[in-house]
Amino acid sequence: MNRTHEKLLVAALAGLVIASAAAFAVQPALASGYDVEAPAVVTGVQRWDVLNVRKWPASYSKRIGALAPQSSVWVERCIEAPQGASDWCLVEAAGTRGWVNARFLTPIEDWDI
């Protein structure tokens, strides 16, 4: 194997490692979950504060928006969190679509009547 082949092999392996890491980073969004397809309201947030909307279902994920207390949202689905943690839900409101912690959502009862 000559030097050029070695460089090509190293580059291919590095690409494979990066692709694997990217797939692992996306894994939380594909975790076990449940469909909701219902409206909810943002609760448990102080009136002077906002609920952060995240790109991925994790508190360290990039913030892509914010919801005021008592905002209405459409909940598409939620993912189950490990024991002792809150679930995360994929919501859409005012043109923003992302993940919020489920403990700050209260379902709107009898919305389809």
Image (cartoon, rainbow, N blue to C red):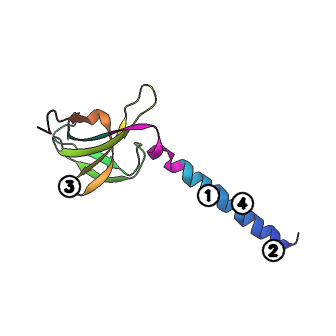
Asked whether, in this view, residue 53 is left or right of residue 6, the answer is left
Q: Which residue was labeled with disc 3?
A: 94
Nearer to me, 54 or 28: 28
Instruction: Give the residue number, with chain letter if any, for mark 2.
Output: 4
Identify the image quadrant of the N terminus: bottom right
Asked whether, in this view, residue 67 is left or right of residue 5, the answer is: left
Amino acid tagged 1: Ile
Residue 88, image quadrant: top left
Q: CA distance from mark 3 to mark 1?
A: 35 Å
Pointer 3 or 1: first along the chain? 1
Q: Give amino acid for label 3.
A: Ala
- Disc 3, disc 1: CB below 8 Å? no
> Depth check: 2 or 78 in front?
78
First reached walking from the N terminus: tag 4 or tag 1: 4
Residue displayed at 75% across by 64% down: 10
- Is 39 included in the stretch rendered in magenta? no
Q: How dense is the environment of label 2, judged by Cα within 10 Å: few (below 14), some, or many (20 and up)? A: few
N-terminal label among 3 and 2: 2
What kind of element bears circle 4?
helix
**Which region shows up in magenta?**
25-35
Q: Quadrant of residue 89?
A: top left
Q: Position of residue 35 (x, y in %)?
A: 34, 40
The foreground one among 56 and 66 is 56
To which residue does mark 4 refer? 13
Element class at badge 3: loop
The residue drawn where x is 47% and y is 45% is 30
Q: Is residue 110 left or right of residue 51?
A: left
Identify residue type, mark 4. Leu
Q: Residue at x 43, y 45 (%)?
A: 60
Q: Earlier in the sequence, mark 4 or mark 3?
A: 4
| Residue annotated with mark 1 | 18
Q: Exactly how many numbered labels are in the figure? A: 4
